Amino acid sequence: MERSKIFAIVVAVVVIVVVVGFSVFIKRAPAPAPENGAESPASATRAPAPEDIRVPEKDSTDVPENVAVPEIVAPSAPTSQSSFRSFDIKVERGKFVPDTVVVRKGDSIQLSITAVDGDYDFVQPDYGVRTALPEGVAKRIGFTAATDGKFTFFCESCGGPDRGPVGYIVVSQK
């Protein structure tokens, strides 16, 4: 074979490999981060937070029955505006009780969840939380409320957000 034909074949193969490799990279590249402080887009388990939401403090008595009152509220750091908030939740008879946790953006959250009458699980995909909840065991789940919104949590083994126990973490900017 002539040298020029071999060179042309090698160049063609290299071009094909580069084009295929680049197209695979483009399909797998992560979405760019939001710019200028913009919020990340909504997901299947995230919606905008209600405008009129009020964050309960420890020993609050004027909250709806389904809203968790924190057991502990403490500053996250001496000069920080955010707080550490700890909540106790039970899951029984196919429901999270209470089913709503309301916090401020930036707060450090600890949920102590106890499955009372069977085995359940706790899943919140936006915050990357997934844990089994064996009957009678209190599991502690911690995360920082980094993004405002209304986040759905659920028991995946019970049928997911459409069929199983469902609850909400509402993160307020206020």
Image (tube, grey):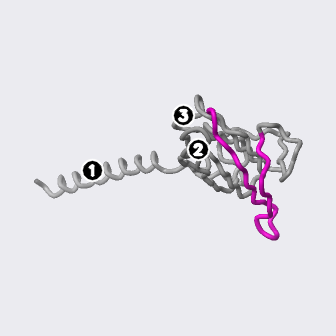
Do tag 2 and tag 3 residues touch (Cβ < 8 Å)? no
Tell me the CA gap for discs 1 and 2: 53 Å
Where is mark 2, residue-wise?
122
Q: What is the magenta range?
A: 67-94
Q: x%, y% of residue 29?
A: 49, 50
Find out whether residue 59 is within the magenta segment.
no
Q: Quadrant of residue 135?
A: top right
**Between discs 1 and 2, the one toward the N terminus:** 1
* Camera sees residue 42: no
Front label number (1 vs 2): 2
Tell me what residue is drawn at x 59 percent, y 46 percent.
136
Point out the residue furthest to the top here: 163
Q: Secondary structure at mark 1?
A: helix
Q: x%, y% of residue 73?
A: 80, 58
Front label number (3 vs 1): 3
Tell me the CA gap for discs 3 and 1: 54 Å
Given residues 172 and 60, the one toward you in this image is 60
| In-image side of 148 versus 23 (left or right) | right
Given residues 29 and 107, the one toward you in this image is 107
Q: Which mark is on residue 12?
A: 1
Do tag 1 and tag 2 residues touch (Cβ < 8 Å)? no
Q: Which mark is on residue 158?
A: 3
Q: x%, y% of residue 12?
A: 27, 50
| In-image side of 146 versus 63 (left or right) | left
| In-image side of 54 versus 33 (left or right) | right
**105 w.r.t. 78: above or below:** above
Give the crowd class for mark 1: few <14, some 14-19, many >=20 residues within 10 Å.
Answer: few
Residue type marked 3: Cys
Given residues 71 and 15, the one toward you in this image is 71
Q: x%, y% of residue 130?
A: 55, 48
Find out whether residue 76 is within the magenta segment.
yes
Residue type marked 2: Phe
